[in-house]
């Protein structure tokens, strides 16, 4: 069982930045691909970013490319999501998730991931 705890959300003005953190409980953290998803009220959960087990490869939704950056520290069992130039429509609960290594095309789908955090609220004011 892997427990994931997100933090770093909050209220920010449009154009602002946040650094989201996801801390994992498992010593096998370095074997997992980590994903970031978000869900706005009344909308489906959508993919934001993913990072492979080594941290060498990252993947982003087109809507966030150039603004979001994912990184990880396997020694600290932590993954990060730097979110810049936030827009009001990006107000959502942001989740991190852990899944197995595999073909990168699978990382974009939430069903690939086995473990989820409770989420952290990001609110972007206009």
Image (tube, helix red, strand yellow):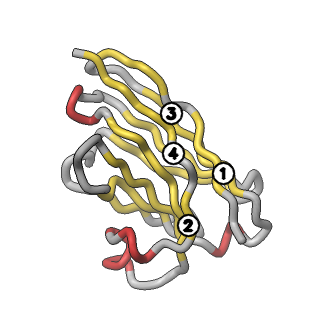
Q: Name the residue under label 4.
A: 119
- Frontmost of labels 3 and 4 is 4
Mark 3 and mark 4: span between their CA atoms? 14 Å
In the image: residue 74, left or right of residue 112: right
Quadrant of residue 24 within the rendered picture: bottom right
Q: Are marks 3 and 1 in contact (CB under 8 Å)?
A: no
**Residue for badge 3:** 19
Q: Which of marks 3 and 1 is nearer the N terminus?
A: 3
Q: Distance between the residues labelled 4 and 1?
A: 15 Å
Residue drawn at point x = 79 percent, y = 67 percent = 27
Q: Which of 33 and 25 lies nearest the eye of the viewer?
A: 25
**Residue at image mark 1:** 78
Q: Where is residue 29 in the image (x, y as percent from the top left)?
A: 69, 66
Is there CB contact under 8 Å for labels 4 and 2?
Answer: no
Helix, strand or loop status at disc 2: strand
Quarter-of-image position of residue 112: bottom left
Cα distance in 3D space between marks 4 and 2: 13 Å
* Percent position of residue 51, x then y: 48, 62
Say which label, 2 or 3, has the lower sequence index. 3
What is the distance, in whole Å, between disc 2 and disc 3 at their CAs?
Answer: 18 Å
- The residue that appears at 48% across and 44% down in the rendered structure is 81
Query: Residue drawn at (47%, 24%), measured in percent from left and top?
Result: 10
Would you call the spot at circle 1 few (<14 residues within 10 Å), some (14-19), or many (20 or more)?
A: many
Mark 1 or 2: the one toward you? 2
């Amino acid at each position: 069982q892997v427990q994931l705890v997100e933090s770093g959300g909050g209220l920010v003005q449009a154009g602002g930045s946040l650094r989201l953190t996801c801390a994992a409980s498992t010593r096998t953290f370095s074997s997992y691909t980590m994903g970031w998803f978000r869900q706005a009220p009344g909308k489906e959960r959508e993919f934001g970013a993913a990072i492979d087990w080594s941290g060498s490869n990252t993947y982003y939704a087109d809507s966030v490319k150039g603004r979001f950056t994912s990184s990880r520290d396997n020694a600290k069992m932590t993954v990060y999501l730097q979110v810049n130039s936030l827009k009001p429509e990006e107000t959502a609960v942001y989740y991190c998730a852990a899944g197995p290594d595999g073909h990168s095309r699978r990382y974009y789908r939430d069903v690939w991931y086995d473990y989820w955090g409770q989420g952290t609220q990001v609110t972007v004011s206009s």
